[in-house]
Image (cartoon, coloured by chain):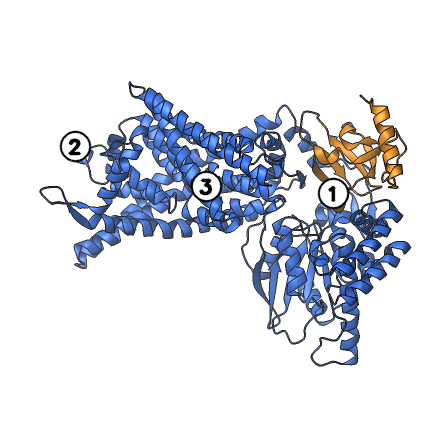
Chain colours: A blue, B orange
Amino acid sequence: MIMRINPMRAKPIIALVGNPNVGKTTLFNALTGARQTVGNWPGVTVEHKSGMCRFHDRQIEVIDLPGVYSLSSGSPDEQVARSYILNEKPDLIINIVDASNLERNLYLTVQLMELGAPLLMVLSMNDIAEANGLSIDIEHLASHLGFTALPLVMNKQMDLSVLTAAIEHSLTHPTNPQCIYYDEIVEKHLDNILRTTVEAGMYPLASRTESPTKVALAEEAYSALLQNRWMAVKLIEGDKEYSSKLNAEQKETVDKEILAISKHRGQEPGAVIADDRYGFIRGLVKDVVKRHRVGQWTFSDAVDKVVLSGFIGLPIFFGVMYLVFLVAVKASEPLISLISSSLTWLFVDKLGALLTLLSLPKWLNYLLSDALGGGVATIGAFIPPIFFIYVSLSILEDSGYMARAAFIADKFMRKIGLPGKAFIPLLVGFGCTVPAIMATRTLESPRDRVFASILTPFISCGAKLPVYTFLGILFFPKHADLVIFGLYMFGIVMGMLTGLMLKKTLFKSEPGNFVMELPPYHMPTLNAIMLHTWHRLKDFVLRAGKTILLVIMIINVLQVVSLPVGKDHQRVPLLKLGGKALTPLLAPMGIESSNWQASVALISGLFAKEAIVGTMQSLYQKGEAAENDKSNTPVYARNIKTSFGSSASAIAFLVFVLLYSPCAAALTMLFKEHGLKWMLFDFAYLTALAWMVSTLIYQTLAFNSGSIYWILSCVGFFALIFVNLRNIGRKHVEQS
Amino acid sequence: MLNNRNRGRLSRFGRRFMQRRESCPCASGDCLSLTDLPSGEKAIITCNKHLLIIERGLYQGMTLTMHRNDSDEPNVIVAVGDARYVLDRRIAREIRVKIV
């Protein structure tokens, strides 16, 4: 755990460490030329990311760590940062500090200093600090801390030359940060604990340097002393990782010392250490920061007065969300047909003609032009709505509104048994369910993490939007935007109802505490929005592209491979057989047996939701309606309308798409984060719920004599699920 | 049934009996829970036992301003230095403050 530069290491490692939302990822992107997602809300980075940069022919590895307030291990993202710093021994830690909130940010700096880590401080958000009437004497601050400190404005054109020079210097001439001293009595007991940690051999004082020189030995001994002192402080703070390394006798000795500290100060031991650290910080801040303006009422406070208002906060939230979908649908409408027709002309018509000219076999021509070319045209048609929804969400994220949305939603989140902070992963779910499940790592309690992950699929991801847009425009051309917004809202309502049910059954305990920082509002820059949007859009196109093309290929192969069926041994394609076998299950929700293509589309949606549209366009190319209708409407569109028959079955189908099992990637992520049990539960519950709700909707909209039977069956089935979950929950409570 | 006053006396007697020191250096009546601090009021933190919250800057002796405290909401918004925090009411209830 030594924190000194290793001269033998060919590729030095620099770790970017700081509080959440201070600009670590922005600096990481600037240093490495990477294009990682950044945002103005805590929890954007939940795992460490690595990139390379080159200074004067020297390769350096840069690590972007999740934001942490301290080095006490809390939520999983904080554990990622802490374990990296403690175990991977970076050669230099760049501590990014928010200049507009210096006092709070220095708490982590003090802990890094105690660790004896080679440090370099970068002060970000100096513009906001200036606007708030703060001026910081940076040289004075650096002299107190014992290492270099630099100002850097992150969201403007960054001048990295000074920073790179400082990095070079810090790597070759690591400095010794100042030591923090606690009060006399605490220091006395700390010394006693330190002796115990040395006895326990938690960090040996013996030399570990390969070619010992006098200087190296002295450095090594000093570093080892700092490490032991750090461990002793962590033992006082009640760190479980370190206390588990002590035997019973040592533990008893340490506990006695800790009790003495607690008695002396009349405080919890952890609070004693934190208070003393803040004592040092407070003195330092008083010395180096000058406040020109006494009042602390900022622009963000004034905006929050309106945006978080009890009366209009919620209408503003819903208005903003509706605007996002309105923009996505209305602005993309003309572009969809333009892109789709251009790509069809290029990749289907012209490519097909070229392949015919080259006299390629008919099956290969069909596979390349109709199947693959058609797939490319399908993906192209998805791009405009996804682009506009990502642009809108990026504006909301970069401006700082997302964190406010979590506060507004907290009231409702509590009702379904989750803390307000869980709203952020759910919001991420509007983009994609996979990062949304990953974002649940920002929640401290394991119960909240599992609970929030189960609810994320209820939020319609970007991949579902093309399905909504495609069928919405086809069946409800005049009210497509309302249908799409309605589906998004219905998903949220169903998520809340599921939350209520799970709160009363499986997750009976109280949700974790909600503590969140509200970042100041920023004016989003065009560059950041476009970068953010490009990053997500590229991910979508690559992931969706691969899956859609694969699914289309499989479907085409299954369409060609046939089996002899019936008395006359007529050959029927495998795909049609499979679809027809599944269709009776979907009959109660209005999918007729002749409409087997719909069930195949739903199966393809298990690979990726975007694949549903591609599959439908491919499977509905042939049909009765195709020959008779001479209008400009594409053949597949007319066939879909004929096969579904009514708007009721189309709505039921859309609701099924909204609610049924998440895609394979999301299921894999659930398995990785929470295990097989929860993955299977999510798959089974969501699919069963989708079937029940779609059936209820169809049977209500197309009410007939048999509808009552189906409605009662659905209610009975749901009651059965509820009773079972309640029993499982009860057993779980009894066991625990 | 005990009234609040006697319940307080009994609790203090219990603490004395167990030889535990009063952790909040605040005379009776001087301090109030953070949830009782009205919006717009400034106060000094006199007692906070949550390490997670202390680490975010709400340590003993720090001045904070209550930005929003609606009793029907599950949390409060406080300004601590230049940071704004949404705090769970359950945590805020355990933080004792003194109005300045």
- The amino acid at mark 3 is Phe
Alpha-carbon span between mark 1 and mark 2:
71 Å
Q: Helix, strand or loop at disc 1? A: helix
Give neighbour class at mark 3: few <14, some 14-19, many 20+ (Cα, 10 Å). Answer: few
- The amino acid at mark 2 is Asn
Alpha-carbon span between mark 3 and mark 1:
35 Å
Task: Work out whether residue A524 can be spotted.
Answer: no
Q: Quadrant of the C terminus of chain A?
A: top right
Q: Position of residue A80 (x, y in %)?
A: 62, 55
Q: Position of residue A102 (x, y in %)?
A: 76, 49
- The amino acid at mark 1 is Ile
Residue bearing the label numbered 2: A628
Residue bearing the label numbered 3: A681
Q: Earlier in the sequence, mark 3 or mark 2?
A: 2
Please state which of the two labelled residues, at mark 3 or mark 2, is closer to the viewer: 3
Question: Residue A60, relative to residue A452: is it above or below?
Answer: below
Q: Position of residue A622 (x, y in %)?
A: 20, 40
Outermost residue to the left: A568
Q: Helix, strand or loop at disc 2? A: helix
Question: Residue A11, relative to residue A646: is it above or below?
Answer: below
Q: What residue do we see at 78% from left, 37% from top?
A: A296
Give neighbour class at mark 1: few <14, some 14-19, many 20+ (Cα, 10 Å). Answer: some
Q: Do tag 3 and tag 2 residues touch (Cβ < 8 Å)?
A: no
A1 sits to left or right of A480: right
Disc number for residue B53: 1
Disc number for residue A143: none
Q: Chain of mark 1?
A: B
